[in-house]
Image (cartoon, rainbow, N blue to C red):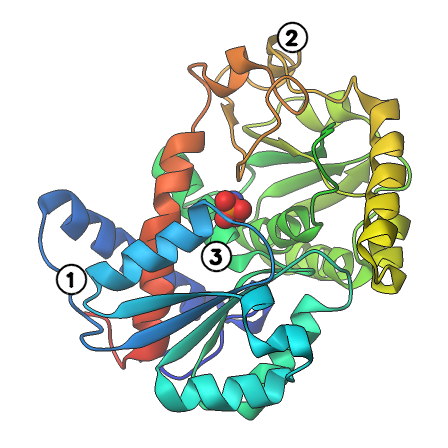
Amino acid sequence: MTSLKGRDYIETQDLSDAEIELLLNTANELKEKFRRGEPTQLLPHQTAFLLFFDKSTRTRNAFEAGMTQLGGHAHFLDSDATQISHGETPEDTGKILGSMGHGICIRHDLVLNEGNKYMRAMAAATNVPIINMQCDVDHPTQTLADIMTIREHFGNDLKGKKIAVSWAFAPSYAKPLSVPQGLITLMTRFGMHVSLAHPPGYKLIDRTVESAKANAAKSGGKFEIVDDMDEAFKDADIVYPKSWGVYDFMLARQQAKTKDEVAENQKACLAINAKYKNWICDEKRMKIAKKSAVYMHCLPADRGSEVTDAVIDGPQSIVFPEAENRLHTAKAIMACTMRERPF
Ligand code: CP
C-alpha cells in the first residue's frame, strides 16, 4: 500500500507516480466531501506551522482553511517576525517547531539557490513532514492542483495533450521560476506534449529542464523549448502563460543584501521584461490554440499585461476552479503526510 506518512513534500520529482496518484485520489475524495458538506476531520488536534518568507493569498488560505477543515490548526508565521530574521538556523527552527506540532509548511521562493536548500536543511533536522508551499525550484502544491484541474476537464488519460507553458509580460515584480519549472517536470510525467516558450534570457534551472526531458522520454510524452509564444500555442489543448524573472537577475539576488540592492535588481529585471510587452495572452492568440483549449494561470495574474480581461474572464478560462483546487490538494498533502491512510 502506498503511504506518505512522515514524508516530506518538497518537489514532485521526489514522489513516485503511485504517490502522486494517492494525493490526487485523496484530493478528489476531499473535494467530494467538501461539496456534500461532510466533515473530514482527518487530523484532529494536529498543528501545522506555515512559515512564509513571501506574500500569499491562495496558498496561505488553502493551508489555513484546509487544516481547520481537517480538524487541526495552522499557525501563520511571517519569517520577518520570527528569530529567523536574527539568524536562527533552519535546523534549530525545524527542531523546535517539530517538537511542538505535526508538520511544517514553508514558502521561500524569491531567491535562486536559497529556498529549496533551506527546506531540505530543515527536513534533515526535524521528524515532522516539510511541505513546500513554493521554493526557488518547485511549486508542488500549485502543480498538483493544476494536474487535478486538467484531469477534471480532460479526463485522467492526458497522453498526447499539448500544454503551452509560456513566459508572459508582467510589470509588477520579477516572479519566481518555480511555477514553470514545476509544470514542465510534472506535466511531462503524464505523457503530455509540453512546449515551453520564453524570450532569450528567461531560461529555467538546468536540472528542472533535464528532469522534464527524462520524464517525457519515460512517459512517451514530448518536451520542447521554443522562443515564440505563438509556436507554443499552436494546436495547444491548454495554455499556461505566466511571467517569471530574468535568470541572471534572479541568480544575482543572492548577492543583493540591502533593500536598495534588491530594489535595483528588481528594476533592472523589470526593464528587460518591458522589452517583451507583446508576450500577452489575448483573444487573438487564444485562436492559435485549439478551439477547445483552456486558459490556466496560478494567479495572481497581471491583468492587461500577462493576459487580457477578455481571456481570463472568458469562457476558456478555468483559473477559478484551478484556484479552488488549491484547497483540496493542500488538504490531501497534509492528510497523507501527517497520518497513515487518509481514507
Ligand atoms: N498561486 C499561488 O501560489 O498564489 P499565492 O501566491 O497567492 O499563494
Disc 2 marks which amino acid?
Lys
Q: CA distance from mark 3 to mark 1?
A: 20 Å
In-image side of 75 versus 172 (left or right) = left
| Rendered-image quadrant of the N terminus | bottom left
Q: Nearer the viewer, mark 2 or mark 3?
A: 3
Q: Which residue is mark 3?
A: 141
Mark 3 and ligand 1: say if the CB distance to the nearest ligand atom is below 8 Å: yes
Q: Is residue 132 above or below residue 88?
A: above
Q: Which residue is mark 2?
A: 284
Q: Is residue 142 above or below residue 86?
A: above
Secondary structure under tag 2 reads helix
For residue 64, the mark is none
User: Does label 2 or label 1 sit earlier along the sequence?
Assistant: 1
| Nearer to me, 247 or 264 | 264
Q: Is residue 199 above or below residue 289?
A: below
Residue 9 is situated, as x and y percent measured from the top left of the image, at 49, 71
Whether residue 119 is visible: no
Disc 3 marks which amino acid?
Thr
For residue 40, the mark is 1
